[in-house]
């Protein structure tokens, strides 16, 4: 009896789809931030104090620049690199709270009293103080 290649392909595709779903569930925890936003002067591409982005009346030329965890954030006044002005979709990230002196961005380096957490890209916010 000859084995059908359609059955084999269908079974392979089904197993692959189940594997991808499993990876998606195990791989990402939407509650854990993956990037941090630092405030940047868009005209000079230099990092500025976070208050420049938090105060909407002063934020015309300023915007959040998102840097993945594990990358070095620049100190205030230094140019940014390694990130994007586009907010990361579908993941949790923080804005503010990165040390003014810069350094490696990771969960323990963020000052949670000076940051806002945006959860899972769905627009809900948590945390946040500022000053």
Image (cartoon, rainbow, N blue to C red):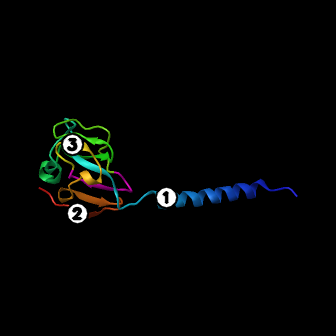
Which callout, 2 or 1, points at the residue further toward the start of the chain?
1
Q: Are marks 1 and 3 in contact (CB under 8 Å)?
A: no
Residue denoted by label 3: 102
Q: What is the spatial separation of the Cα atoms under label 2 and label 3, in whole angstroms?
A: 21 Å
Q: Report helix, strand or loop for mark 1.
A: helix
The residue at 88%/58% (across/down) is 1
* 106, 48: nearer the viewer: 106
Q: What is the spatial separation of the Cα atoms under label 2 and label 1, in whole angstroms?
A: 26 Å
Label 1 crowding class (10 Å Cα cut-off): few <14, some 14-19, many 20+? few
Residue denoted by label 2: 127
Q: Are marks 2 and 3 in contact (CB under 8 Å)?
A: no
The residue at 69%/59% (across/down) is 11
Nearer the observer: mark 1 or 3; the answer is 3
Q: Image height check: is 75 above or below 12?
A: above
Residue denoted by label 1: 24
Q: Which contiguous range is marked in magenta?
A: 88-97
Residue 2 appears at what percent x and percent y? 85, 55
Residue 41 appears at what percent x and percent y? 18, 41
The residue at 16%/53% (across/down) is 54
* 61, 15: nearer the viewer: 15
Residue 16 falls left or right of residue 9: left
**Residue 93 within the segment the image draws in magenta:** yes
Residue 81 appears at what percent x and percent y? 29, 37
């Amino acid at each position: 009896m000859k084995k059908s290649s359609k059955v084999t392909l269908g079974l392979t595709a089904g197993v692959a789809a189940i594997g991808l779903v499993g990876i998606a569930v195990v791989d990402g925890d939407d509650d854990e931030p993956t990037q941090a936003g630092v405030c940047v002067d868009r005209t000079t591409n230099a990092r500025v104090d976070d208050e420049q982005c938090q105060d909407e009346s002063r934020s015309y030329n300023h915007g959040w620049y998102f840097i993945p965890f594990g990358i070095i954030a620049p100190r205030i006044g230094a140019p940014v690199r390694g990130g994007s002005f586009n907010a990361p979709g579908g993941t949790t990230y923080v804005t503010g709270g990165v040390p003014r002196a810069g350094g490696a961005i990771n969960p323990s380096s963020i000052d949670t009293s000076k940051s806002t957490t945006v959860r899972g890209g769905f627009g809900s916010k948590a945390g946040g103080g500022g000053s």
